[in-house]
Amino acid sequence: SNMGELCIHSVLVTGANRGIGLGLVRHFLGMSNPPKWVFAGCRDPKGQKAQELQNLASKHPNLVIIPLEVPAPASIKAAAARVEEQLGGSGLNLLINNAGIAKPSPLDNETLENMTCVYTTNTVAPLLLSQAFLPLLKKAAQGSPGSALSCSKAAIVNMSSSAGSIEEVYLWDYGQVVSYRCSKAALNMLTKCQSLGYREHGVLCVALHPGWVRTDMTGGSESLTAPLTVDESVRGMLKVLSSLSEKETGTFLDWEGKVVPW
């Protein structure tokens, strides 16, 4: 049924060529009332790793693949210009900062390079993307009726992880991944800051934990297999997004809508 389905004119998903990003794109395209524009940001749109995205684009004229090399400021700026041009005067309802990396280093092997590289992609890129797309998000917020915050109006969704929860330190025994954990804890703080800074512009901001999902990033060969499929996670997250309001801006929630401790 159509109950509670997210109703949006436009969405941009980063890291859209595989895993959760690709799953989100598929679900947006498959909605009974799909967005007029689904923008899929990926590093190499013509490359082998974006093949599935290309196949989808050939079937769905509302899917636009945007070359996006995060966190390069010039690439982000160019992407924002392309999206703005395509939208032709309307705003962007939803920015999903999903692109992320993990390097499996334990505490003793962490390096300056690892820490910096992971932080730059997982924390700095969402900051820069949000800055670049803020004018379009503001435009969407101004163009939608009522003052209440919602994802149908304008929202930034930062894909986080309970691996970055300082209280939970989820799956420590499975993998220390210190650089990844630090980057996600910082992303949660960024989300809180954005919620405070952008509330006056009508933009809702939320950090989402997709669950422990079977993707290339988490690997699938170990005896400990991630319990969730991409499909289950994405379906849950979209349901959560459709239900968000004023009181959830600046919060950290999981794919079932449960609050994750900071």
Image: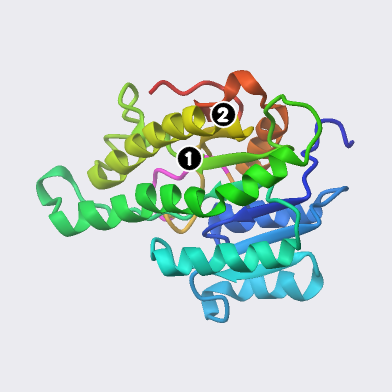
**Residue at screen point 47% across, 55% down:** 99
Q: Is residue 205 above or below residue 224?
A: above
Residue segment shown in magenta: 221-228
Percent across and percent down for residue 88 are 76, 63
- Name the outermost residue toward the left: 108
Q: Please tell me whether the stretch drawn in magenta is mainly helix, strand or loop.
A: loop
Percent across and percent down for residue 166 are 30, 26
Front position in the image: 225 or 216: 216
Residue 76: say if magenta. no
Front position in the image: 245 or 252: 245
What quarter of the picture does the C terminus occupy?
A: top left
Give the side of residue 232 with respect to residue 219, left or right. right
**Is there CB contact under 8 Å for labels 2 and 1?**
no
**Residue at screen point 52% across, 59% down:** 15
Percent across and percent down for residue 238 are 68, 39
Kind of element beneath mark 1 = loop
Kind of element beneath mark 2 = helix
Give the side of residue 55 with respect to residue 206, left or right. right
Q: Which of the two discs, 2 and 1, sits closer to the camera?
A: 2
According to the picture, the residue beneath numbered tag 1 turns out to be 212
Residue 222: say if magenta. yes
Categorize mark 1 by other alpha carbons within 10 Å: few (<14), some (14-19), many (20+).
many
Q: Amino acid at mark 2?
A: Arg
According to the picture, the residue beneath numbered tag 2 turns out to be 199
